[in-house]
Image (cartoon, helix red, strand yellow):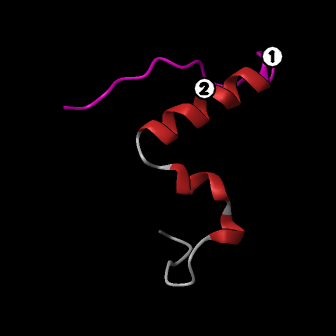
Amino acid sequence: MGSKWDIEKFTGSNDFGLWKVKMRAILTHQKCSEALSGIANMPNTFSAAE
């Protein structure tokens, strides 16, 4: 069963710090925390398209 998250899109006028905390929590909950590491920590086996 999937999860639906209601998070406001960051527009520049809302609070970035709060948005960042919410996004980090959602990604961690969905076991996607590797996405938070950035491109520099991406394994060499991935292509840019992945």
Q: Which residues are magenta?
A: 1-16
Q: Main secondary structure of the magenta part?
A: loop
13 in the magenta segment: yes
Q: CA distance from mark 1 to mark 2?
A: 16 Å
- Give the residue furthest to the bottom: 45
Q: Left or right: where does residue 42 sit relative to residue 4?
A: right
Secondary structure found at label 1: loop
46 in the magenta segment: no
Q: Position of residue 33 (x, y in %)?
A: 53, 50
Query: Exactly how many numbered labels are in the figure?
Result: 2
Q: Which residue is mark 2?
A: 22
Camera-side mark, 1 or 2: 2
Secondary structure found at label 2: helix
Mark 1 Cα shell of 10 Å, populated few (<14), some (14-19), many (≥20): few
Amino acid type for the residue under numbered disc 1: Ser
- Give the residue furthest to the left: 1
Res. 25 image quadrant: top right
Q: Are marks 1 and 2 in contact (CB under 8 Å)?
A: no
Relative to 18, does residue 46 appear above or below in the rendering?
below
Q: Position of residue 1 (x, y in %)?
A: 18, 31
Residues 41 and 12: in front is 41
Upstream in the sequence, badge 1 or badge 2?
1
Q: Position of residue 31 (x, y in %)?
A: 42, 47
Residues 14 and 29: in front is 29
In the image, what residue occupies the spot 25% across and 32% down? Answer: 2
Mark 2 Cα shell of 10 Å, populated few (<14), some (14-19), many (≥20): some
Q: Position of residue 42 (x, y in %)?
A: 60, 71
In the image, what residue occupies the spot 60% across and 26% down? Answer: 22
Q: Which residue is mark 1?
A: 13
Amino acid type for the residue under numbered disc 2: Lys
